[in-house]
Amino acid sequence: MGFVKAQKTRAYFKRFQVPFKRRREGKTDYRARIRLINQDKNKYNTPKYRFVVRISNKDITAQIVSANIAGDMVLASAYSHELPRYGLEVGLTNYAAAYCTGLLLGRRVLKMLEMDDEYQGNVEATGEDYSVEPTDTRRPFRALLDVGLIRTTTGNRVFGALKGALDAGLDIPHSEKRFAGFSKDNKQLDAEVHRKYIYGGHVAAYMRTLIEDEPEKYQSHFSEYIKRGIEADNIESLYKKVHATIRADPTAKKSEKEPPKQHKRFNLKKLTYEERKARLIERLHALNAAAGGVDSEEED
Amino acid sequence: MPAGHGVRSRTRDSFSRPFRKKGYIPLSTYLRTYKIGDYVDVKVNGAVHKGMPHKFYHGRTGRVWNVTKRAIGVEVNKQVGNRIIRKRIHVRVEHVQPSRCTEEFKLRKVKNDQLKAEAKAKGEVISTKRQPEGPKPGFMVEGATLETVTPIPYDVVNDLKGGY
């Protein structure tokens, strides 16, 4: 069996249309992106802001982004790895942390635009649907939620971040259908359940069941909580404190990073266009000199 | 049955997307802004069905006279009979590109202003008018050898050797 029929012929490759780079990487949904970015032409250069929430395995990123032909510009960003600065050190990717990140971003943007006194938002998180009311002087900051490629199920953490931003005072068009605690049978948001999630009540409940049923698993799973003395009962007050600290000072802190160290190069560095041209001229000079002193000509 | 003269007749090739460029259109088309008075080229994008101009306007250049939410009003010249009419059409932004027809003019304007400002500072008078390319300057022909060519006398015998 020497001859195997080729699956992908040369013809296949010649006709293959490569998708956009970010589609190949599986990072951007262009259908959604077109609809989010498209600005009315009679609004000319007015930016249209997206409230981008992306969740990784260990971090939550929330950004306010506006699109440009050269590249998207980020107005402000908040990461859940900044939350230790505000007193939250564990559970950085749960629903409550998402709420805190959204809240931090919202307050940060408002402070940046000097609107934070006007639009306080919902200071006491109750879990029920809150929309910003426009005041007389300035209209609220408007952004559109950009979830990316996640499946928008009820109770997803991106909607926790959305709730945080809404309570901070941003104007983001939304519906309460996807907040944690919305029941499909009643078609209503149970504000109590949502409030429980915002304050980490679901984590506390799990902690309690584990302590009763499987104490060893509790020790291993919540080891970081135990190390910091966080118990099922203090979780709510912990988050309340974090919210208050966030509202007090949401400004971003620039982190000083040392310049990256130089690594040893294992391959030759690529030459620039000028360097390559100069090398060519040198080689031609050398050739002509070797050929016997004919007038060397500079090749363009 | 005859071919028919519908709105999109004979557009099989002109409205089709180019080879290996089908599917989603790059987002910069949506991010460009157009102001009234800009020159734009109308080029139909077959992937977007709404707001398509008629096939006559494919490849025409016109000026923007109106800007709406998703479309642009373009004023294009069309010859109807013995006169040219300025036709106003509305086209979605996907079928429009900014025109580079005035680019050279704009650059020249800026450069001329700069040259004039410099000349004014120095106090000399310059003309920024473009001159057409004149005839090439005269030159002496170098290294030419002269070869005199004279016709050879007609030789009947040799010429008829090949055949009749």
Image (cartoon, coloured by chain):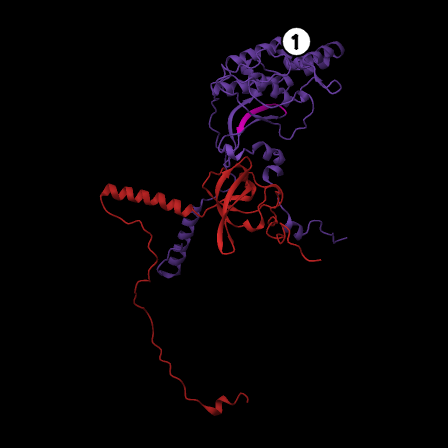
Q: Name the residue furthest front.
A: B82
Is B126 contained in the magenta span?
A: no
A4 w.r.t. A103: above or below: below
- Magenta segment, principal secondary structure? strand
Q: Position of residue A161 (x, y in %)?
A: 61, 21
Q: The chain coloured red carries which letter?
A: B
Q: Is residue A269 visible?
A: no
Q: Position of residue B34 (x, y in %)?
A: 48, 38
Q: Position of residue A170 (x, y in %)?
A: 55, 20
Residue closer to the observer: B120 or A222 = B120
Q: Position of residue A9 (x, y in %)?
A: 68, 51
Q: Is residue A169 visible?
A: yes
Image: magenta residue range: A57-65
Q: Colour of chain A?
A: purple
Report the side of B107 relative to B27 (left or right). left
Q: Chain of mark 1?
A: A
A137 w.r.t. B74: above or below: above
